[in-house]
Amino acid sequence: MLYFSHPASLEHDPRAHMPGHPDTPERLVAIERVLADRDWLGWERREAPAAAERELELIHSAGHVEAIRELCLSGGGPIDADTFVGEASYRAALHAAGGACAMTRSLLGGDQRVGFSALRPSGHHAERDRGMGFCLFDNIAVAAELAIRELGVERVFIFDWDVHHGNGTAEAFRRRSDVLFVSIHQAGIFPGTGPSGDFGSGEGEGYTINLPVPGGSDEELWLSLVEHIVLPVASSFTPGLILVSAGFDAHRADPLATCTLEAGSFAQMGCHLRDFAAELGIPLGVVLEGGYEPVALAESVAATLAALGGEGEAISAAPEPLLTSRAAVGVSRHWRL
Ligand SMILES: [Zn+2]
C-alpha cells in the first residue's frame, strides 16, 4: 500500500484571493494528523514527483499548461469565480499530477497493488483548455492516459465517487471505449453536468455512465449503486487498472453538498473496490478529489485506507428499488447487469 504526498500541496491556498474558500491546505494537514496518529495504517509513504509538462499534455493543450504556468508565475489570480491560483500553485499542481502518475507507474510495475495519491489541487473538473472548480490539471485523467499510452494497459476503469460530477474526466474520455468512466454524483449542484441519459458519444457510447442521485441521498443508495450497477458494469469491461476519483464531499458534514454518507460508507466503498480488484487481480489507485470539512475528510480517508489495506468486510446492499431500477434501465441498454 503506497501513499503519495508532497509538501508543495500545502503552498496552494485560494484564500489569498478569496477569504473563506473551502479548499484549504488544512484539509491535508487534518488527514495526515489522523494517519500519523494511527501509524499510517501500515501504508508506505512516498514523495510525489512533479509531473513533466509533456505528461500534462497527454490530456491538456500546451496552451492551457502554459497559461496556468504563466498566471501562477506572474503572481497568480482568478481563473473563474471559485478557482484561484497563487505563485506556488503551479508547483503544487505539478506534484498533484505527478503523484497520480507515480502511483500508477508503481502499481503497474508490480511494486504494490493499492495506492493513494493525497495531493492538492484536485483535478476532475479541469478540462482540456481550462481549469475550473478548484482544479487546474486533471490528475486522474493524466494518469489513466499515461497507463494506456506508455504503460501497456489496454483498458482503464475510472470510478468517480466525488459528490460533484467529474466533468473534466468525462469529457477527456467521452469518445473512447478504452476508458470506462462511471460517476455517482449529486444532481443539481456544481458543475451541472452528468445527466443519467449521457452515455458518451461515437465509439465511446456506453463507456460513460452517470448515476446522479438526489440531494439527501444516503449510504444505502450509494452502496446499492456501487454493488448493483458500478461493479457489474466494470466487471464486464475487464479493465487492467482501476483508478478512483475519491472525493469525500458526499459526507453528511460537508458544506458543499447534502448527501449523508459517513466515514464508514467510504470504507464500505473501499471494501467493495478492494475485493473487486483482488478478484480481477489488477491494481487499484485512488486519487484524492474533494472533501471540505477537515475532520470528516480525515476520518473518511483513514477509514478508506484501512479498508483498502484489508480491514473490514464488504456488506451486501439491498438493491434500492426505485432509483436503482431507473438508473439500471438506461445502463442495461449498454451492459448486462
Ligand atoms: Zn467535489
Image (cartoon, rainbow, N blue to C red):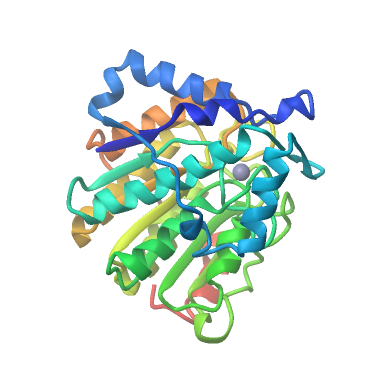
Residue pictured at 70% horizontal, 53% vertical: 67
Percent from the top left, x then y, of residue 304? 37, 35
In the image, residue 111 above or below residue 155: above
Q: Is residue 114 left or right of residue 290?
A: left
Q: Is residue 292 left or right of residue 226?
A: right
Residue 305, by quadrant, is: top left
Quarter holding the C terminus?
bottom left
Residue pictured at 73% horizontal, 26% vertical: 15
Is residue 9 visible in the rendered image? The answer is yes
Residue 314, by quadrant, is: top left
Q: Residue furthest top?
A: 37
Residue pictured at 27% horizontal, 18% vertical: 39
Q: Is residue 141 left or right of residue 217?
A: left
In the image, residue 109 above or below residue 151: above
Number of numbered discs on residues:
0
Percent from the top left, x then y, of residue 261? 53, 37
Q: Nearer the viewer, residue 43 or 163?
A: 43
Is residue 316 visible in the rendered image? The answer is no
Q: Nearer the viewer, residue 150 or 162?
A: 150
Quarter holding the N terminus?
top left
In the image, residue 79 above or below residue 311: below
In the image, residue 199 above or below residue 91: below
Q: Assign ligand 1 to one image quadrant.
A: top right
Percent from the top left, x then y, of residue 155? 34, 71
Percent from the top left, x then y, of residue 28? 50, 26
Q: Residue furthest right?
A: 81
Residue pictured at 70% horizontal, 57% vertical: 130
